[in-house]
Amino acid sequence: MNFSSKILEQAVDHVSQLPGIGKRTALRLVLHLMRQPANQTAELAGSLSKMRHDLKFCTTCHNVSDNDLCEICASPKRDRTVLCVVEDIRDVMAIENTSQYRGLYHVLGGKISPMDGVGPQDLNVVSLVNRVKNEAVVELIFALSPTIEGDTTNFYIFKQLGDIPVNTSTIARGIAVGDELEFADEVTLGRSILHRVPYETSLKS
């Protein structure tokens, strides 16, 4: 792809580094931005810069937040006895969209995947176990995607809990095995949350 402008080429190169964006798509996006009023492009750049520098992670659940404590953890309306374990913030958003869950969350920041070089030490597992130990958690819901990596992560956490007196459950498998949670439709995901099953039962299936 030949460019008559080094500035344009650099912009396209940076945009094409985004997931799922090739050079041609990046060029279309950059040319679209060029046709927009200058203030709109400046607002976009400012918003991205603010996100990069000011966005925080909740000190309790590791969800993204504008403050040290996210809105979900800070809300007095949430059921603090139930903790839902998810892979990342997209899963929090997906479950929240179902309007079927009123408990709290714990974002692991990934799942165990030796092929990708991700081990338990790379995830927010220690802080999860500490929350279960020190907070009034009655039930822990495993809501990771039903993949081999997700099941491995569930089992690892289950073993780490040891003799801690907490009920463990996993979302019902209305979601096909191997599917990613974020792509499930809201009705299926909502029903999976409502019809969760004891984790020990899922080990036998």
Image (cartoon, helix red, strand yellow):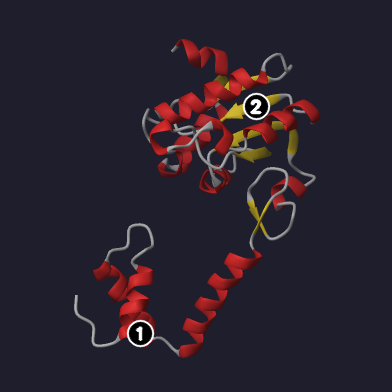
Q: Position of residue 24 (x, y in %)?
A: 24, 70
Q: Position of residue 14 (x, y in %)?
A: 38, 70
Residue indicated by mark 1: 7
Please report contact status of discs 2 and 1: CB closer than 8 Å, yes or no: no
Secondary structure under tag 2 reads strand
Res 115 label:
none
Which comes before the other along the chain, label 2 or label 1?
1
The image quarter containing residue 86 is top right
Residue ID at (43%, 31%): 114
Q: Residue furthest top?
A: 204
Res 140 label:
2
Q: Nearer the viewer, mark 2 or mark 1?
A: 1
Q: Nearer the viewer, residue 139 or 77?
A: 139
Residue ID at (40%, 38%): 116
The image quarter containing residue 78 is top right
Q: Position of residue 146 (x, y in %)?
A: 43, 29
Secondary structure under tag 1 reads helix
Residue ID at (70%, 52%): 70
